[in-house]
Amino acid sequence: MSSTNSIHSQKDDEELKRFEMELEFVQCLANPWYLNHLGQQQYFKDEAFIRYLEYLQYWKKPEYARFVIYPHALHFLDLLQYPQFREHITTSENTQEIHRVQYYHWMYLRNPPKASKPQQLQGASPSAPPSLPETTVTVNNP
């Protein structure tokens, strides 16, 4: 009886460890410089790694996504399914641009500036957040 409990406990521990490791890896994908590093180290040319990225798509399901702290990780996980993006992120210039856009998103779209004086709040009408520089990442389809 105790050996059965021990086997179940061991299996549960292994599943928890796998869950934590995959969650940590998925969250690392929110960092464009980490993606650049993976590209520089040729991981994006490894078919097994590409299949692993495809497998990780299950993290987008609500029951798993609720554990992800950095939503950009799921967006980048989607983009990593495309060879054009994997190639794009391997250059420092492109990575810097993606990081800049991500930074401005966090700065202005996630937390729009608030009015500092009470009279500004009373007479303020709803307005759009400050406009960001026009930037797009284009991926050429074959």
Image: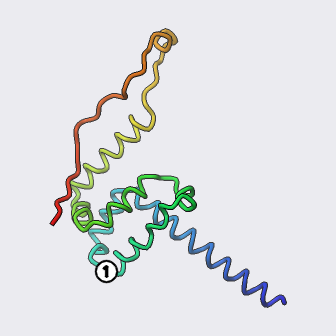
**Residue 136 x, y percent position in the rendering:** 23, 46
Q: In this picture, is 128 found above or below 139?
A: above
Residue 11 falls left or right of residue 86: right
Q: Name the residue rendered at 36%, 43% in the picture.
A: 103
Residue 111 falls left or right of residue 130: right
Q: In this picture, is 70 found above or below 25?
A: above
Q: Name the residue rendered at 29%, 73% in the picture.
A: 44
Residue 33 falls left or right of residue 4: left
Query: Which quadrant of the figure has residue 3?
Result: bottom right
Quadrant the N terminus occupies: bottom right
**Residue 90 x, y percent position in the rendering:** 24, 64
Q: Name the residue rendered at 52%, 65% in the picture.
A: 23
* Type of amino acid under label 1: Glu
- Neighbor class of circle 1 (other Cα within 10 Å; few <14, some 14-19, many 20+) is few
Quadrant the C terminus occupies: bottom left
**Residue 85 x, y percent position in the rendering:** 25, 62
Mark 1: which secondary structure? helix
Which residue was labeled with disc 1?
47
Count of residue discs? 1
Q: Name the residue rendered at 31%, 49% in the picture.
A: 99
